Image (cartoon, rainbow, N blue to C red):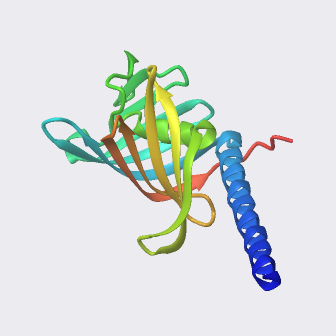
Amino acid sequence: MKRFLTFFALAALLTGCVARTADTRVETLQSTYDGMNGCTARVEAAIVRAEETASYVLDVERTGEETRVTVREPEALAGISATVGGDDSLAITFDGMVLDAGSVEPEVCAVNAASIFLRAAAKGYVTERSRERFEDVDDALRLCFETERAGKKLLVTAYFDESDKPLYAELEEDGRILAYLQFTDFTFCDIISSH
């Protein structure tokens, strides 16, 4: 009986340490995303619509609260840029001309999907966390975040590598996938210290 109690106490202690380590990793990750001045990324995005799924290759540049997205593919749209402000305002740029386009609708599109992901990683409420194999990363951190967009609750499920760079994310609403994001390149800009 004594041996069983010792084993049980050791198992509880180890489980508590693992949970605290995971919590610390999540806190550090969210602090990093919340405190960064910006980032750059290449993203392969698939935006799901009722009639089709549209695929894009996008260059994303986040500076402060603004996210600039430049289309690389499809070729017919290459070079068109859009900037999403912190208030979800939208400006479209092509050949040096800027068009104020109001706010982003629908809730998730190629222009704002990366911005929604970045906001969720920084400030979203974490509902699930685990470590899983993702493609060639043996110990990827999988997190599910709740966030809002236009008053609607979105769920963002994302995988991160050991340096907290995103690998992949899915955005969904009410169990319906709205977008898939595959990050093929990601670089943090300066991180602002929160201390």
Q: How many marks?
A: 0
Q: Residue, x 48% and y 36% (percent of image)?
A: 116
Locate residue 62 relative to residue 184 in the image: left or right.
Answer: right
User: Looking at this rendering, what residue extends furthest in the front direction?
Assistant: 1
**Looking at the picture, how far across and down is residue 157, in whole percent?**
46, 49
Front residue of this view, candidates 67 and 30 = 30
Locate residue 13 relative to residue 88 in the image: left or right.
Answer: right
**Looking at the picture, how far across and down is residue 10, in whole percent?**
78, 76
**Looking at the picture, how far across and down is residue 161, in whole percent?**
56, 64
User: Looking at this rendering, what residue extends furthest in the right direction?
Assistant: 195
Quadrant that contains the C terminus: top right
Whether residue 107 is situated above or below residue 59 in the rendered picture: above
Residue 25 location, quadrant: bottom right
Q: Residue, x 51% and y 33% (percent of image)?
A: 147
Quadrant that contains the N terminus: bottom right
Q: Residue, x 39% and y 28% (percent of image)?
A: 96
Front residue of this view, candidates 181 and 1 = 1
Locate residue 172 relative to residue 7 in the image: left or right.
Answer: left
User: Looking at this rendering, what residue extends furthest in the left direction?
Assistant: 51
**Looking at the picture, how far across and down is residue 79, in whole percent?**
33, 40
Residue 34 location, quadrant: top right
Residue 52 location, quadrant: top left
Whether residue 136 is situated above or below residue 146 in the rendered picture: below
Front residue of this view, candidates 96 and 178 = 178
